[in-house]
Amino acid sequence: MASIGILGAGTWGIALARMLTNCGHDVVVWSALPEEIEALSATRRQRNLPDMVIPERTRFTKDIAVACAGRDVLLFAVPSVFVRATAKAAAPHIPEGQVIVDVAKGIEPGTLYTMTQVIRDEMGDRRVSVVALSGPTHAEEVARDLPTTIVSACTDADVARKVQDVFMNSCLRVYTNPDVEGVELCGAVKNIIALAAGISAGLGFGDNTKAALITRGMAEIARLGKAMGCYEQTFAGLAGIGDLVVTATSRHSRNNRCGELIGQGVPPKEAVERVGMVVEGVNAIPATLQLARRYHVSMPITEAVDAVVNGGMAPRDAVDRLMSREKRSEIGAAVQYERAMLRRGSDTKRVITYGTFDLLHYGHINLFRRAKALGDYLIVAISTDEFNWNEKHKKCYFTYEQRKALVEAVRYVDLVIPEENWDQKRRDMHEYHVDTFVMGDDWKGKFDFLKEEGVEVVYLPRTPEISSTQIRRDLYDANAVEGESRVSHDDINTDPGSEGRR
Ligand SMILES: NC(=O)c1ccc[n+]([C@@H]2O[C@H](COP(=O)([O-])OP(=O)(O)OC[C@H]3O[C@@H](n4cnc5c(N)ncnc54)[C@H](O)[C@@H]3O)[C@@H](O)[C@H]2O)c1
């Protein structure tokens, strides 16, 4: 059994204290508010969880040194605005090698640090392991032992597993994830989207609006996260869409409730006061917008919530602004994340090639493989049907969308963009920060002008004995396909080994 110190005696800290005590761990809780410690130890009740009784074995202390000394795990459970001050106060009492778990969700304005980064920052040179524990976990339901899931995120897999072991029980299932920044970003920004969902409910809107806010909200969180280098899977996971769904739809969510009051016309400041607990979504807005600017990512829902909460805009006007935004493609957004990623860091060597890529074949894939070997990131520009027809006077067997889908399925290819005219190449070299331009040597010399754009121009030898023209000719003469299998699937024994086992 583990010895656990909990810093913070709010709703989540106390719900976890009860759960961990009931699992047999030795739990000591500290709060910065001495009167809170007195009330908790006297009543064994937390004001926001009136039906939950705190076990007698859960201990309380007003001394942060006691909470930190000799703990297997030290849990930070204060609202994000108090994390730095709490880490500063705790730091002198935290030993080398301490495993620290943070459950606060937020981003620090100014530094733009996530909460584990803030804690690390306050530890100075001391070597500690910091885990972000986050997911769809309302304290009110954990207090009732309702089945819940959560993510233990740490770059050190052994530490993530250690925390998984300590927190896992028959009511709480813990998954590990190495993407700490992605997990924390989701935890912080989903609260802003939950405010938006609450505002829409307060305005009297329905499930359609809520679903739209959750989906497009996730799109903007993922756009920012991907630009920051977080893992794509995190956004589809428990700390991502899981936490967003619970926060944007649950009656327990204070962000949702605060938004609802705002939507009903209560001034934002008063709405926060009425909720009576920390409303992390409001705290997260400035830092999230700073991150969006830093990574050149558009976050229209976050901007709309900011306009309402901090800019005095009427919620109805913010909705009109969102609904009348310039027309967009849902899928096109993916290209924008990719562009944002491309802007990051100059170490990535980008390679581009252009073509029709009809009837995708071995020659094409060989070209992609060799082009990719010239750098780290391969962009393939595929000529659109209009371009083929109007400028090249040819019609493809597969449509642009089909050719795009096929090329995207090739693992050497990182991004597919449309080629719409002959003139775009110079522009593409800059927009996609291209280092190397690659074509087959049947175009030798034809694109040397791109060297003027500071790009290396490479003509790769064509793969012998294969060409789209030849394949098309063969298809045209389709009856020439010989030796085609005439055996029906029903006649094949697909498990020959089974004979011997019978
Ligand atoms: N409540 C939940 O269901 C839940 C679930 C997951 C994560 N979280 C996250 O956990 C964090 C804490 O949430 P909560 O629900 O416990 O909030 P809360 O509003 O219940 O917590 C308030 C607590 O903060 C502490 N505090 C007050 N002033 C302080 C100060 N000056 N210095 C240090 N500590 C001080 C006190 O212990 C107080 O009880 C938040 O970041 C929240 O997003 C909450």
Image: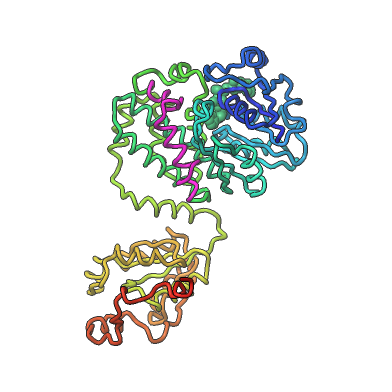
The magenta segment is 233-261
Q: Describe residue 96's horizontal placement relative to residue 193 as left or right.
A: right
Q: Nearer the viewer, residue 100 or 342?
A: 100
> Residue 408 lies in what quarter of the image?
bottom left
> Residue 207 lies in what quarter of the image?
top left
Q: Residue at x 36, y 37 (%)?
A: 213
Q: Quadrant of the N terminus?
A: top right
Residue 221's x, y, as percent? 45, 42
Residue 192's x, y, as percent? 44, 33
Q: Residue at x 63, y 46 (%)?
A: 161
Residue 96's x, y, as percent? 77, 40
Q: How is the image coloured?
A: rainbow
Q: Describe residue 475's horizontal placement relative to residue 93 as left or right.
A: left
Residue 18's x, y, as percent? 61, 26
Q: Quadrant of ligand 1?
A: top right
Q: Nearer the viewer, residue 163 or 464?
A: 163
Magenta residues, dominant SS class: helix
Residue 35 in the image: above or below residue 174: above
Q: Nearer the viewer, residue 472 or 288?
A: 472
Residue 475 in the image: above or below residue 142: below
Furthest-front residue in this view: 502
Does 248 appear in magenta?
yes
Q: Describe residue 55's horizontal placement relative to residue 231 as left or right.
A: right
Disc count in the image?
A: 0
Residue 425 in the image: above or below residue 322: below
Does 402 appear in magenta?
no
> Residue 68 lies in what quarter of the image?
top right
Q: Residue at x 45, y 79 (%)?
A: 460
